[in-house]
Image: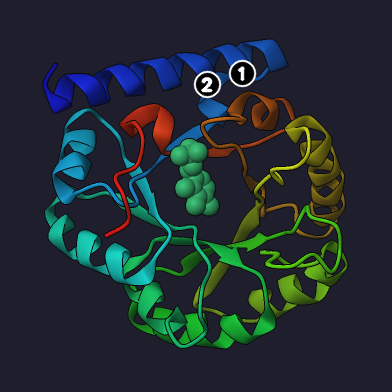
Amino acid sequence: MTRREEIADGLERTRARINAACAAAGRPAEEVELIVVTKYFPASDVAILAELGVGDVAENKHQEAQAKAAECADLALRWHYVGALQSNKAAAVARYADAVHSVDRAKLVKKLAAGAADRPAPLDVLLQVSLDPPGREGRAGADPADLSALSARVAEEDTLRLRGLMAVAPLAEDPSAAFDRLSEIRADFLSRYPEASWLSAGMSGDLEAAIAHGATHVRVGTAVLGSRPAVK
Ligand SMILES: *Cc1c(COP(=O)(O)O)cnc(C)c1O
């Protein structure tokens, strides 16, 4: 199989899973956007994805994302930044990303807003909410109790557009239980920000559970592109 055939196959299987999960949840398939996570994969794979009709790709490390977005600038893709974000990199990320899913603390907001100032349109921002138990080591995402203050902070910035929430299911738990909590957190959030209706949740292993709980954007790497190459 050529690389193109491999990717086409992964893409077809993933789209079939998304369609089946939408059907099972009684949701129209158009409600769920596939974002292909291209981290560690070469720009040549991104070009194949674009040829195969993918419009949205995601990266999780600033340096790799910046280089790949520049290399693929002619492909008219939307770039999603989904990784941990250092505040000294936030302004740079805002210059090439079309959406940042991992905003989890107020300190990032001002820097993203400044970096987004030269963009033709506001930068799409999602707040990453932690589904881990409070106080857990290495926990990414805002505490659900802090979402309200963080949303208000983003809403103050003209160069940012609050789009919704993002979460990663904790490894140690059944994803359905975690996404169940997420849908409660989201219902509360939507009562204050009804326009911010994106829910970025679900990866290769748990996209069905995420779609059953209202995900509008799934972030899928392995199921489309195969096992990730070793870290460079
Ligand atoms: C890598 C990554 C994904 C994709 O994970 P797969 O299991 O390969 O589908 C999704 N979301 C985030 C935040 C990631 O870092």
For this rendering, which residue is in front, 181 or 120?
A: 181
Residue type, numbered disc 1: Cys
Q: Secondary structure at mark 2?
A: helix
Residue type, numbered disc 2: Ile
Q: Position of residue 193 (x, y in %)?
A: 75, 58
> Where, by quadrant of the figure, is residue 115 drawn?
bottom left
Q: Which residue is mark 1?
A: 22
Q: Position of residue 169 (x, y in %)?
A: 69, 44
- Residue 4 in sight here: yes
- In contact (CB < 8 Å): disc 1 and disc 2: yes
Is 186 above or below relative to 208? below
For this rendering, which residue is in front, 131 or 150?
A: 131
Q: Position of residue 157 (x, y in %)?
A: 59, 81
Q: Is mark 2 within 8 Å of ligand 1?
A: no
Q: Which mark is on residue 10?
A: none
Give the mark count.
Answer: 2
Q: Secondary structure at mark 1?
A: helix
- Identified at 74% across, 74% down, the residue is 150
Q: Which residue is mark 2?
A: 18
Image check: 57 left or right of 28? left
Q: Is mark 1 within 8 Å of ligand 1?
A: no
Which part of the image, by quadrant, shows the N terminus? top left
Q: Residues within 10 Å of mark 1 (few under 14, many from 20)?
A: many
Q: CA distance from mark 1 to mark 2?
A: 6 Å
Image check: 113 left or right of 197? left
Specify how the rendered protein is coloured.
Answer: rainbow
- Identified at 41% across, 78% down, the residue is 116
For this rendering, which residue is in front, 214 or 193?
A: 214
- Residue 219 in sight here: no
- Identified at 69% across, 43% down, the residue is 171
